[in-house]
Image (cartoon, rainbow, N blue to C red):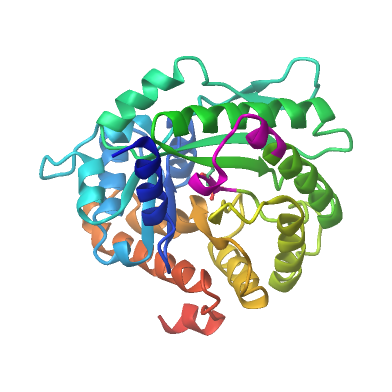
């Protein structure tokens, strides 16, 4: 297969109707933060056991087209000795890999961050591909204050995202391009909208400059929301209208899919917001779906609580959230389903 055919085949699988992506790529400190409230020790065995239960949940393949893994998971085995990426592949789920190495402060842009990990990326991608990964994820982070993100922050982060995406495509790996505008703070929804528009404009300019093939990537943005310390919350209809307005202004129609992160929204909130977009805007040029971490996993970790005997209940909790979001992906979710399911 040529690189182009490879990219086309992967994107075709990822964008499957009725499905979305599970982000299970928490770094070691981040998964620790998820386990801590339930006093689950952050050991490699617990991470393996937890992720195995997610990847073997019966029926989840109806709603999940791909899973983003953390590097450690790519090399771990299920209880029967099968490598975890192989388990996914057998179920028709595409394994992906988080390739960025987290953020550091950006020089000359106080308050802004920049993501590391470009050094040696082509070689790392070759290794991940040999382990089964077919797509990748890279996240740039933008905090909102009166001064941030700065124009330099917006440009530097866009350039890093585009460099990563271009390298991935050269290796036959589909890039998920993730510019996350954080929910933290007391900013208004209007301010989030203004920042998200500037960020996405810069990202697509940089992708163009670096000759990234838009047809062979997925955008993973945050939704346009008021800051979490800015009451009152916006309704799903308001979130949908504000988010789609920004996307229409910035994202070319050639991009096949926009798969949102949940970014601190509650599980049901993230579902309701995605659903509202698909109800209000059924004829957009891109597929609008989910690539949630916390909004898919919070109820699962709670149900599991680190105990083997809770595995089936945790898998059920995962399938249920996956199904609700699978419905939201085509605007067929209602809040009644949450109580009746
Ligand atoms: P959340 O849905 O929890 O924001 O995680 C998605 C993700 O991949 C963050 O990089």
Where does the image place residue 273, in percent across and percent down from the top left?
63, 67
Q: Residue at x 71, y 37 (%)?
A: 205
Is 211 within the magenta?
Answer: yes
Q: Residue at x 53, y 30 (%)?
A: 166
**Can you tell which quarter of the image residue 42 is in?**
top left
Seen in the picture, residue 291 relative to 7 is either above or below; the reply is below
Check the image and name the residue furthest to the left.
Answer: 80
Q: Residue at x 10, y 45 (%)?
A: 80
Where does the image place residue 46, in percent across and percent down from the top left?
29, 39
Q: Residue at x 52, y 21 (%)?
A: 117
Q: How many marks?
A: 0
Would residue 159 appear left or right of 192 to someone viewing this image?
Answer: left
Q: Toward the viewer: 82 or 211? A: 211
Quadrant including the N terminus: top left
Quadrant including the C terminus: bottom left
Using the rendered image of the protein, determine whether residue 77 is visible from the camera's viewpoint.
yes
Check the image and name the residue furthest to the right.
Answer: 146
Q: Toward the viewer: 16 or 22? A: 16
Would residue 250 appear left or right of 178 to someone viewing this image?
Answer: right
Would residue 244 appear left or right of 45 to someone viewing this image?
Answer: right
Q: Toward the viewer: 117 or 296? A: 117
Seen in the picture, residue 193 relative to 278 is either above or below; the reply is above
Where does the image place residue 146, in percent across and percent down from the top left?
89, 38
Is 325 within the magenta?
Answer: no
Would residue 229 appear left or right of 65 to someone viewing this image?
Answer: right
- Span colored in magenta: 205-220
Using the rendered image of the protein, determine whether residue 99 is visible from the camera's viewpoint.
no
């Amino acid at each position: 297969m040529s690189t182009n055919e490879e990219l086309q085949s992967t994107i075709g699988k990822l964008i499957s109707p009725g499905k979305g992506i599970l982000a299970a790529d928490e770094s070691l400190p981040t998964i620790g933060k998820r386990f801590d409230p339930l006093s689950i020790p952050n050991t490699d065995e617990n991470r393996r056991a937890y992720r195995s239960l997610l990847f073997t949940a019966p029926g989840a393949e109806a709603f999940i087209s791909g899973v983003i893994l953390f590097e450690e998971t790519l090399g771990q085995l299920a209880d029967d000795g099968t490598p975890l990426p192989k388990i996914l592949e057998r179920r028709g789920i595409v394994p992906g890999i988080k390739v960025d190495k987290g953020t550091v402060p950006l020089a000359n842009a106080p308050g802004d961050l920049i993501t590391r990990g470009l050094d040696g990326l082509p070689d790392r991608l070759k290794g991940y591909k040999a382990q089964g990964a077919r797509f990748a994820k890279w996240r740039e982070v933008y905090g909102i204050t009166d001064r941030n993100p700065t124009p330099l922050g917006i440009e530097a982060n866009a350039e890093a995202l585009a460099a990563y995406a271009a390298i991935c495509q050269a290796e036959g790996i589909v890039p998920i391009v993730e510019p996350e505008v954080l929910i933290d703070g007391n900013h208004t929804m209007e301010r989030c909208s203004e920042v998200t528009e500037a960020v996405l404009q810069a990202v697509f300019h940089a992708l163009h400059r670096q000759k990234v093939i838009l047809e062979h990537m997925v955008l993973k943005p945050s939704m346009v929301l008021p800051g979490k310390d800015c009451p009152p919350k916006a309704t799903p209809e308001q979130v949908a209208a504000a988010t789609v307005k920004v996307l229409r202004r910035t994202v070319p129609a050639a991009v096949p899919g926009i798969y949102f992160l949940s970014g601190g929204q509650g599980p049901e909130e993230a579902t309701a917001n995605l659903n509202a977009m698909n109800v209000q805007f059924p004829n957009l040029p891109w597929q609008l779906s989910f690539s949630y971490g916390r909004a898919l996993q919070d109820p699962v970790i709670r149900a599991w609580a680190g105990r083997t005997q809770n595995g089936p209940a945790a898998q059920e909790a995962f399938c249920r959230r996956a199904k609700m979001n699978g419905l939201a992906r085509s605007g067929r979710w209602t809040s009644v389903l949450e109580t009746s399911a």
